[in-house]
Amino acid sequence: MTLLQKLRFDNRFTGSLPSDDVGGSVPRQVNGACFSRVAPANVANPALVSHSSEVAELLGISPEAVYDQSFADVMSGNRLLEGMDSHAMCYGGHQFGNWAGQLGDGRAIALGEVLDVNGDHQMLQLKGAGPTPYSRSADGLAVLRSSVREFLCSEAMHHLGVPTTRALSLVTTGDKVVRDMLYNGNPQPEPGAIVCRVAPSFVRFGNFEIFASRGDHETLRTLADFVVESEFPHLNSPNADKYVALLREVCERTAEMVVHWLRIGFVHGVMNTDNMSILGLTIDYGPYGWLDNYDPHWTPNTTDAQQRRYRFGNQPSVAHWNLLQLANALYPLVGEVEPLEEALEHYSQHFEKSWSTMMAAKLGLPSLADPRDSELAESVLTLLQSVETDMTIFWRELANVDCSGSSELLERGSPLLRAVYNVNAMTVEQSKAFHDFADGWAIRQRDLNVPIGERTTLMNQTNPKYVLRNYMAQLAIDEAEQGDFGLIAELLELVRSPYADQPDKERFYSLRPEWARTRVGCSQLSCSS
Ligand code: AMP
Ligand code: MG
């Protein structure tokens, strides 16, 4: 028996919830069911590209087992293990603010829930494993470029301390997948790939919305009861209070998640309600991006270029709007508006509190309670937009600003100028603003007298040195498409320790190169994957 075959499955989702009684993957509307059983498609030549050793370890998969061909066979969907129960979930969603009806797992097939080494349930899900009843007119497949992006980014997010789905493996399928990358009438064959994603649950806001929209309150209640029992057992109660408590906790978790995104400069790109996890995990890595220069109006998603609904700075209010849709979906189970409104309000309160703690930590301050400190927080965001300034480098360098009282420090903000894209083009006033900010920050640090070691540790645990900049993932993709997976391995290693100084990786601690400013994949991405 191989170590893979030792995986223990306990399929709560498919074992407890109503299933679609039609088989196969013919596109259809599925009523009164939370999922449809469907088998992954066969692929030509599955080959392992990369895997996360931490996720393998969590699942109890031995380090050697991943190098056996059977691992690639299973993680490509070519082979199902005993105990697996492959299926696609039924959900709906609001896309770009509009109700879109039934969506569902169109290019994801879940394999089943593994009991991990801690005894917790982990759903394995293959992204790009072939058509399902929810594929509509699409093929259910994924290409290498989008799979590399999801694989690296979800692991990077985890190591940054952001709640996220994980990625166990990345395999190429040996099949070609045709994609019109920019939707401009230029379809091309691309290498196909599959990521095995892992999370305790992949349930989204849209799983609730679909049943509420159809007036199917029975299935809605069954699903809500299941989610509370399996994922939020501490909220369980015999009455409707549990649904309100569920909303309240989802509000809290979602607020936490978005605050993390703001801390590290992450833009999700497609915050539709079908891409919002009930566990408050970052989910569905599509046209996401990282801020190089700090610009709250930026979004990498070309599909959203006009409206910019999902731009960096709009993510907190979009999350709130999405939670309102979840509240509406839960309403039939509660029957009263006020408790749901109160729970929703909790989002804003929790967000404010959490944002303020996060900003204080970025600034190396114990809190923003003192008005002088909240002013610093405000002024830093203005400063970051005054000239093109790299967000990651600016924050990381702040810890290197000298706080001593020496009056000789006329240019206290010098370390921060390393983050400016075009220092030579700065006006005298613009550079002065950097030095003034640094002076103001140093004064507060002297007032507070926090030992430098303590301050630096706090700041360096909050302000990452390495993030998965868009161009870095793109370089790895360029090489991978030529059959060279070296940079994927190197970047995976890099993102494992985003807060540590990695002297041999210093080249990744630098401003975005000029060529990446406008290149497709680095600054512009579409949903086409
Ligand atoms: P997204 O916003 O990218 O998460 O996708 C929105 C919806 O489209 C989901 O229901 C997906 O399952 C579906 N979808 C996206 N791409 C494909 C594809 N290549 N094949 C089938 N369904 C897809
Ligand atoms: Mg999605």
Image (tube, grey):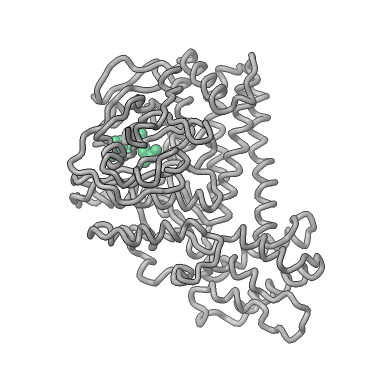
Residue situated in front as seen by the camera: 527 or 256: 256
Task: From the viewer's side, name the closer residue of 529 and 209.
Answer: 529
Q: Quick check: 304 left or right of 194?
A: right
**Relative height, residue 408 to residue 59 (above, below):** below
Q: Is residue 136 visible?
A: no
Image position, residue 226 (x, y; %): 52, 20
The picture quadrant for ligand 2 comes to: top left
> Considering only vertical position in the picture, is 358 above or below 397?
above
What residue is shown at x 35% (from left), y 30% (from top)?
Answer: 111
Give me the residue at 28% from left, 29% from top. Answer: 132
Near-viewer residue (526 or 238): 238
Q: Residue placed at 30% from the left, 43% from the top? A: 194
Rendering coords of residue 431 (x, y %): 61, 78
Residue 380 seen = yes
Residue 456 versus residue 411 in the image, above or below:
above
Farthest-out residue, front: 1
Left or right: residue 438 versus residue 11 is right
At 51% across and 52% down in the image, what residue appears?
159
Residue 130: x and y, percent? 25, 35
Q: Kindly indicate the quadrant of the structure image that contains residue 513.
A: bottom left
The image quadrant that residue 386 belongs to is: bottom right
Q: Is residue 87 above or below residue 443?
A: above
Position of the N terminus, as image quadrant, is top left
Residue farthest along the bottom direction in this orientation: 408
Q: Is residue 427 left or right of residue 182?
A: right
- Residue 214 at x, y = what percent? 43, 18
